[in-house]
Each structure stands twice: as structure tokens, then as C-alpha cells.
Amino acid sequence: MEKSLFERYGGFSVVSRIVLDLYDRLLDDDDVGPFFDGIDMAKIVDHQTKFVSALMGGPASYTDDQIRKMHAHLAISDAHFDTLAAILRQTLADHGVAEEDREAIVGAFAERRALVVEADR
Amino acid sequence: MTIAAINEHLLRAIGVGVALLDLGTLRLRFSNDTFREWFGEIEIGAELLDRFAGFDAAGLRAGLETEGRYATETTFRLRRRTMTVALAFSRALEGDEAVAVLVCQNISRIKELESMIDSYSMMVERNTREIKREKEQVEKLLLNMMPRTVYEEYKTFGVVTPRLYDPVSVVCIDFAGFAEMVATHDPAVIVSELNDIYTAFDRIGEQFGCARIRAVGDLYIAVAGLPDPAEDHAQSAANAAVRFLRYLEQRNSSHPIQWSCRVGIASGAVVGSVVGVQKYIYDVFGPAVIQASRLRYHARPMRIVGSEAMARALGSGFTVAEAGRVELSEGEGEPAFAIAAELRPAGEG
């Protein structure tokens, strides 16, 4: 059986670093950071852990419906989505994820655009 | 630069928050850059403990008075981040004045890691539960295909050593006119009916220690005396076979499609093994299987025919009547026997 990206890049020990780095970068970013204002740290970390794990084929997966519901109350625009994609791409690059795999991960993320971006924007 | 100047520079620039408090009033005497970065500008001589939400001032005083130290944590938000800082107070002397030294370590990352591990272990636990459930389903499926002892061997070693079982009794059944039935009825109906019948046969077999080994189309093979040897294998097989027929008779009386089967039973040796690598299946081979198969052709519809060895091993409880000769192996024919339940079929369980 073909190994998932999650396994190939060293499982949780490596992915955990990506998760925390991504957490830092998202909170520091003044574009997407405000979405996390007032949200409990444990909740954000949980969200990021599952997010990265799911994108890399680790032990978490969301149905489209779950993703839609989780983001329904947020006014996420295409620009926000693009920013997050760029941050994700850069974080993966800084952790040594090869370009081909990076694009696969960001591609998997981009496929969910319609689920989170507000329709009337 | 003097040592004292270096010390002071270090103290100000270090990544640990440091503050000095007057021991009596607990008001601020000094704070370094990191401390101010976390807790904001506080004037010298100002009240400090107000900055820490829900701080237990009495606990601090008691700790400093008895053990000379006190430790706690405080959580606050700083630029969107939830910061958790460990506060360690200790009593000291500055010249001849008693002060409290407060050392603050940023443990936010540890808290974040703890949260991440919690989140991850929950995911892993959920996955483990799912895997366990799937494993149980696979095990159930495999146990339908082979006896438990064989399954255990397969699971442990990845292979199954062929084993000789001797003696056992093999029951072989097929249905009269099956090809025509398939041609004249909806295939889904035939499959559903067969499923119904085989399920009933399986249940009856289980009751009498006669386990199904194979069911391919209209051919049903079950064996008594395997994997655990049983002295009464012939009786088990005959008991099951008699009830197979009884079940079919009852079923035919209330169903539009009429099923008529013939049964051959032979006693002897078989070899049991898992066959195949990718598509493995547990199967039995040997003279008893071949003989049971041949005897079945000799049986009239809804009748049971057994081999001589089987009839001899049968004992009481059944009527055994000669039924001509069958060529069971190469060469001359051997005697065959019609087997039926001896006592009032209607009254028996």
C-alpha cells in the first residue's frame, strides 16, 4: 500500500512541528489572524492538528458537510482563502516538504474553497 | 563593561520575565524588558498582583513566610495568543532588605503541545477503535470460512499446515433440476432462496456438529468430526442430513418454488487446508469427499445414501437399507445404503 504524505514525512513528530508553526503564522497574520480572536487556544490547536493531518492523509478526515458547517458563521473571502493557501505553502516549504507534495497538499486544501468562502462575495 | 553591568544587561534582555517585589507590600521594585513585554508597563512602587487574573495573594504570603517560595501559573491573551506563564516567587535579601524575586517562564508552547497531543491522541484513539471494529468484522468473515483452530494457526503463522482428519463424515448435497430452476426463475429469487436454505442448513449443521465447508451453486458440503475429532461423526452427519430433508419438506409445503435435494454421506479420511495465496479458502479433500459426492448421484430425490463405512459407524437411531452398489473408487462397485430416521419423524425435534 502506498504511504500517505503523513507517514512519508515522519508521522506526528514532524507534522506536529508544521502544525505549531502554522498556528504561529496564522495568528501573526493580520489578514487571517482576526478569525482566531477570542477563540480558545486548545480549540485552535485542535483545529490545526486535524486540518494538517487530514490534508496530509493522517488520521483525521472531515466530510464536506462538516467543513461547511464549521465555517458557516465566518465571513471568509477569496482573499482570506488565498492568504491561508500562501501561508500553508510557505510553512510546508520551510519544513522541507518537496514542491510536488506541497502542491498536492495545497491542492487538496484548495478543493475545499467553495465550502468555506462565503458564496455572496 | 563591568561584570555588574553585564549582569544587568543580561537580566534585562533575557527571555525570562524577572521582577523584584517588596516583601512587605508586594509592590514592584524592578522589572526587566521581557516582564514588561508580557504584563505591560508597571510603575515602580505600583501594585503588581492585580495584573494576574484570579491571583491568590494570601497563598503567596503564606508560601513566602513558610517555605520561602511560591509557584503558580497565569494565563492571559497577548496579540491573539493565549499566553501561559509560570510564576515562581522566592524570598531573598537585597542588601539588608527582604524582597521577593519573581521569575516568569513562558510555558505557552508546552500548553499548546499538550493541547495538540490531546487532539492527536483522540484522533488516534478513534482510529484505533475503527480499526478494531474492522478487524473484528474480518475475523468474523474468516471464521465463517474456516474453523477457529485453523484461523488461529493462520493468524499466528500466516500459513496453515494441511492436516489429516480421520475418521470424519462428509455430507454432500445437491438439488435436482437446479440448472432448469436458474433458467426459469429470476436469478435474484434463486439466490435469495438458496441463501435461505443454506442459512437453515448451517444452523442445523451447527446444532449437530456438522459444519459447512463449501457451498458452490447448488453443491453444499458439510463435515462432522472436524476440526475436533468426534466419535459420533456418522450420527452427527446423519442427524443433520435427516433434518435438512425435513426442513426442505416443510419449506416446500409453504413456498411456491419446490426444492428437491439428494444427499450422499461417506465416512473416512479428509485433509483440511487453506488453499490459495491471494484468494484463499479453507477446503477439505480426500476419499470421503469424493465418495460422498458420488453417493449423492446414487440417491433418489429427498433421500440419503451412505457408504458402507458410514452405515457401520452409524449405530442405532436410523434405519439402514441396502441400496445397490456404487463405484466409489476405481474398480468394482461397493455397497451403498439408504439412510432414514428410525422413529416417527413428525414427533422428533
Image: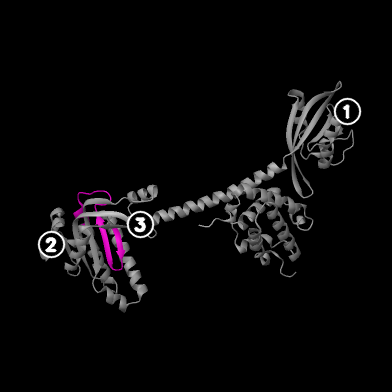
Among numbered discs 3 and 2, the one appearing first in the sequence: 3
Residue under label 3: B144
Residue B50, percent from left and from top: 82, 38
Residue B102 lies in what quarter of the image? Answer: top right
Can residue A82 be seen in this snapshot?
A: yes
- Chain designation of label 3: B
Q: Nearer the viewer, mark 1 or mark 3?
A: 1
Q: Earlier in the sequence, mark 1 or mark 2?
A: 1
> To which quarter of the image does residue B327 belong?
bottom left
CA distance separating discs 1 and 2: 115 Å
Q: Is residue A48 left or right of residue B223?
A: right
Q: Quadrant of the C terminus of chain B?
A: bottom left
Q: What residue is shown with label 1?
A: B2
Identify the amino acid type marked 1. Answer: Thr
Specify whether residue B216 is painted magenta: yes
> Which residue sits at x=74%, y=66%?
A78
SS for tag 2?
strand
Amino acid bearing label 3: Asn
Residue located beneath label 2 in the image: B337
The Cα atoms of the two marked residues, 1 and 3, are separated by: 85 Å
**Crowd around label 3: few <14 · some 14–19 · many ≥20 (10 Å):** some
For label 1, the crowd category at 10 Å Cα-Cα, with few meaning under 14, some 14 to 19 and many 20 or more, is few
Instruction: Say which quadrant the N terminus of chain B sits in.
Output: top right
Rendered location of residue A37, percent (x, y): 76, 53
**Residue stretch rendered in magenta on the structure:** B212-237
Q: Amino acid at mark 2?
A: Phe
**Residue nearest the viewer, comparing B318 with B2:** B2
